[in-house]
Amino acid sequence: MPHKPASLLDASILVPAIGGSFRKLDPRLMVKNPVMFVTLVGAVLTTVSIFTSQADRGFITQLSVWLWFTVLFANFAEAVAEGRGKAQADSLRKARKDTLARRLKNGQESHVPAPLLEKGDLVVCEAGDVIPADGEVIEGIASVDEAAITGESAPVIRESGGDRSAVTGGTKVISDRIVIRITSEKGNTFLDRMIAMVEGAKRQKTPNEIALTILLSAMTLIFLLVCITLKPFGIYSGVAFSIPVLVALLVCLIPTTIGGLLSAIGISGIDRLIRRNVMATSGRAVEAAGDIDVLLLDKTGTITIGNRMASDFRPANGITEQQLADAGQLASLADETPEGRSIVVLAKDKFNIRGRELAAPHATFVPFTAQTRMSGVDLEGRSIRKGAADSMKSYIEGKGGVYPAEVAKAVEAASRAGRTPLVVAEGSQVLGVVELKDVVKGGIKERFAQLRKMGIKTVMITGDNPMTAAAIAAEAGVDDFMAQATPEDKLKRIRAEQAEGHLVAMTGDGTNDAPALAQADVGVAMNTGTQAAREAGNMVDLDSNPTKLIEIVEIGKQLLMTRGSLTTFSIANDIAKYFAIIPAMLMATFPAIAPLNVMGLASPQSAILSAVIFNALIIIALIPLALKGVAYKPMGAAAVLQRNLLVYGAGGIIIPFIGIKAIDVIVTTLHLA
Amino acid sequence: MQASDWLQFALFLGLLTLITKPMGLYLMQVLDSNGRTWLDPVVRPVEKLTYKILGVDPQREQGWKQYTFSMLAFSLTGALFTYAILRLQHLLPWNPQDLPGLSHHLAFNTAVSFTTNTNWQSYGGEATLSYFSQVVGLTFHNFVSAAVGIGIAAALVRGISDRKTSFPTRSTVDRVFQPGETSSKTRSTVGNFWTDLVRVTYYLLLPVCVALAIFLVSQGMIQNFDAYTHAKTLEGAEQIITQGPMASQVAIKMLGTNGGGFVNANAAHPFENPTPLSNLIQMLSIFAIGSGLTYYLGRMVKNQGHGWAVWAAMMIMFVGGVLVCAHYEAAGNPIHQQLGITNVDRVFQPGHEDQTSSQTHPTGNMEGKEVRFGLFNSSLFATVTTAASCGAVNSMHDSFTPIGGLVPLFMMELGEVVIGGVGAGLYGMLVFVILAVFIAGLMVGRTPEYLGKKIQAKEVKLAMLTLLVLTLSILGFTAWASVSAWGVAGLNNAGPHGFSEMLYAYSSATANNGSAFAGLTANTPWYNTTLGIAMLIGRFLMIVPIMAIAGSLAAKQAVPAGPGTFPVNGATFTILLIGTVLLIGALNFLPALALGPIVEHFLMGQGQLF
């Protein structure tokens, strides 16, 4: 299952990765990573000089072994990252068992292997059938088990028309019968793309990765120049720098740490998304998520719990609150809507009015209809109704009752406060108003405060009127809101934000969200949404949880932070390596420079060897960090910079001094040099 | 360092800090084609006339390619003009000494040297050039090469800053804008080369130089067109005393960070640097424009904190350099001390003749120093002149202690970004700013952006290209010279010191500094030619990528700043910037420095000299 967490030390991933690190030595693959390619060439040159040089064979052999390790360790990092993805791909692939589809052509059913289905074909699926490819339900309604992709065992409803018509190949129909129109091309189903994504088969370098690769390559080129010119400098100075020593210096100076871990960082960023059940269509989208500074969030489901809940009873004059609650509860007992249930719950909470068994002979339920816009119950001569204020008013007046002024006032006050008033009446007497309000999710306000600190503006989108919207916006602590928003309004808003230079993310599920999802820099479609929405966005949330947008942004940021931190660390390491290698290179000719050997390394050979060993081992040591990402806390940019600069910049300067010295002690103790 | 040294240092830093803001504000006006200055009534008509003659519309801004092309065409023409004058100086007026025309390689070297604001002098000043060559052929470049540098810096700053136009233009981002939609769009131009050139020369360099020259004359500097004076010394020997229009030359030599001395001894000569006050003012004028440009940067990008952060990074590296240099010069040469050579500079400093001070302080290194300036003012001047790519000297850097000499060398190898050459220092530093923002910007979890403009593959590529070019030229040419007969033949000193001389020469040429470890005999065809090429590389192969960065950034839309924006002001950024300059810029030269001054230093400790 995609969401199954894999341990960093999972042998089923680590063991194949060892083989992978050797397969990746193929120069055609290595050349894509210039830093490691130069290391590879250096390893080859050093290996050759084991045989060509007369002296120090043992030293050169050890040097070349560690240079090979450096390359292999980098390959290993990439292989582990890919391996973690492959494990997920394998479980996905199981869902893509070749099934026989029941194709419907001119009213005739025929069995066709699923891979042969064409776009536009119609297929029939009944209980027990696996849906052969992505499509849209055009007839019927069915419950579908989507566990194969989402890992969620509860079945979901898929029906023709509306926003829940999309079905995914590999999922299973568990009840009823539906007719599906295939919408995906052969071999390009959602499942196919998901597998490709997880495996990194189609992984292309993201813009930011390209820029970083350029920086690292240019640094490699500069250090290459530094080492090449050292040869003639040595000739002038009377120092014979040997090829292995120059190669050792070069490999230590070029940014092998970040060069070796760069692709692992990228792969694991996508991996982290998948673990949260989000499918990105490209690595670019993950990176863009880090840049987002405006979030358009749908009110319902993201900011508020899906449905409105009863919050207060406002009795009319002469009625107690308890009387109103009692009547409200009776009117709602048979009402299975969340609003109705919430009235029952509130009555119980406030006055301990227990649910009563209402048997059919005594009670007649009046269901809600679009015409009457009210519901209620007739029970033992009592006739209780609840409904929208205006329809209740005409109902009461029609019965010859009086619609009290204070109730009208309470209704208005509730509306102004962003709540939905329901008027409750018994016979022709108005008992009062039950207020329903949106319930803002717990902790969401704090979440928005964190986002604000990170420089991300939140905009709430709602179909509510401006008054209601403003009240909820204030309660939830969003920065801005759009009331009575249509899909066109969303699109306009996104364009306006982008025109000012902002990067915008949004979620959506309906077909009418598709243009906005396509326009947004990060558009997250809900898996329960329509096919159009899923195609328009650049991510799909398999859990269909709109709040996840915030996590997606955090993952994007963490990806970029990890890259930057390890780059800084890698570059900062050079100081210590210079102090290890330069004195060692000159010691033989100019013994006077001994004081420059600040680490007090035992001998020139052990110094060079220790630097190279440190350089190789640090790659292995940092693989977990590359895969997990650096610690992420929602803070302002200035605070984050200070923290990471201290940890990875200052740390990057100090750690190698300690590490190289420690390795030198070991190397000397073992008499390796 | 003694109390008086600290006092002088504090005075210099204090005065520099004071002039930074006014200079920056004045630059705001000079570098704006509609700017206003108090000189307008006098200069405006001349400026307008100049545009008419040049056929330039001062209001029409250029894209980066046009700007660069104009600059290259102008510089090439200027170089050819000077080359012709130097070759033909025997046929031209104002040549009372009847000096002959220059050899082709010396003329090439000298013409390039002055065009590139380097002012490397392979020629021997008063002994080689006629007054006409100095005043017309060289002084012209002293002004315009400085103006070009300032213009390039301004063009880059314009590219960085978020300048909007109010009229609608066709958008390049069709995804965002619908055709015909009006909105404030980013301007993709970077200014007008000809306007910058004319305005900087007319409103900044010329007027300040007039004032500075008058001041220098008041200190005793000469300004005439007389033939050299022949004098008899007390011992009866014949002495030729240089004359000439010195004050006017020296003013622009300092202000424009040119550094080419009127006389061969440069600012160590009593005429060219008559008093302690003239010494102080000359040092200040070297830093004045470069320092003011950081303020200009802050103003233009509407983030004065950023301007000061860049300035602080420069000053911290500068102060560090001065302290190291002064420390090692004061510590002196242990071999001299063992021989009991007395501290000659103390004798000339009133208040320090007492026994205690000369005993408690180790004997400083006074070789190659003018006794009038002493240890500290020589160390300070050496660091100033190399931190800024000036190259004027008031002492002989070749005679510094190894580490004392490493400081000027290191300052140049940083890429002349510590104040740097006028304009060149700022645009060089901004390359490091871009790299710092790129590397550390990732650490805040966003695509790196510099003042709201995204730093992407293109900017990184161009920024790294400038570093690659710098390293290639310095290390490449030094490597070539160090194993060539022509390279080694020019050396006056053997061993690591000889190596330092070559390294210094190519560092100085590439960084467009112009100062020299004087031990090198550079007036040979090979040295003249290779150094000339290094100067061309260091100037134009830096400018072209930097202008491409300016163009690329100018076309970008700025993301509005917020709490998630990468901070480019404050102490953290200053530290980050220093770290980037040292780690990305300077570490490349560590192996070479190890073979030169560092080895020499340790060998000196063991009693071996070169």
Image: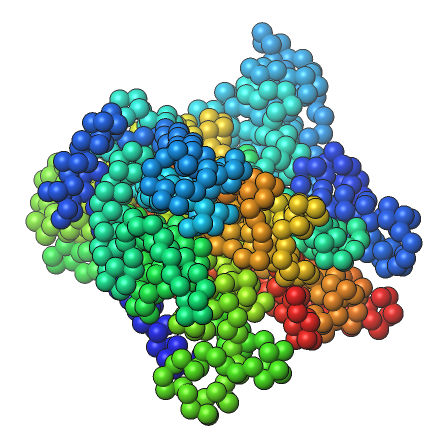
Can the viewer see residue B106?
yes
> Quarter of the image holding residue B11?
bottom left
Residue A365, x across and y down, in percent: 33, 41
- Residue B467, image x, y percentages: 53, 46
x%, y% of residue B148?
35, 40
Determine the residue positioned at 36% across, 53% down: B228
Colour scheme of the rendered structure: rainbow
Image location (x, y in percent) of residue A110: 67, 13
**Front one among A5 and A671:** A671
Q: How many marks?
A: 0
Which residue is at 69% across, 75% downward?
B606
| Residue A464 visible within the image | no
Q: Is residue B381 above or below residue B135?
A: below
Report whether A434 appears left or right of A43: left
Assign the N terminus of chain B to one quadrant of the image: bottom left
Front position in the image: A451 or B35: B35
Q: Nearer the viewer, residue A583 or A424?
A: A583
Relative to the observer, which residue lies in front, B28 or A658? B28
Vertical comparison of A299 with A56: above or below:
above
Q: Residue furthest top?
A: A106
Identify the residue at the far front of this view.
B236
Which quadrant holds the C terminus of chain B? Answer: bottom right
Query: Could you tell me which residue is drawn at 66 percent across and 75 percent down?
Result: B605
Residue ID at (30%, 22%): B179
In the image, taking residue B33 as reference, residue A403 lies left or right, namely left
Q: Please state if B608 lies on the left or on the right of B77 as rendered.
A: right
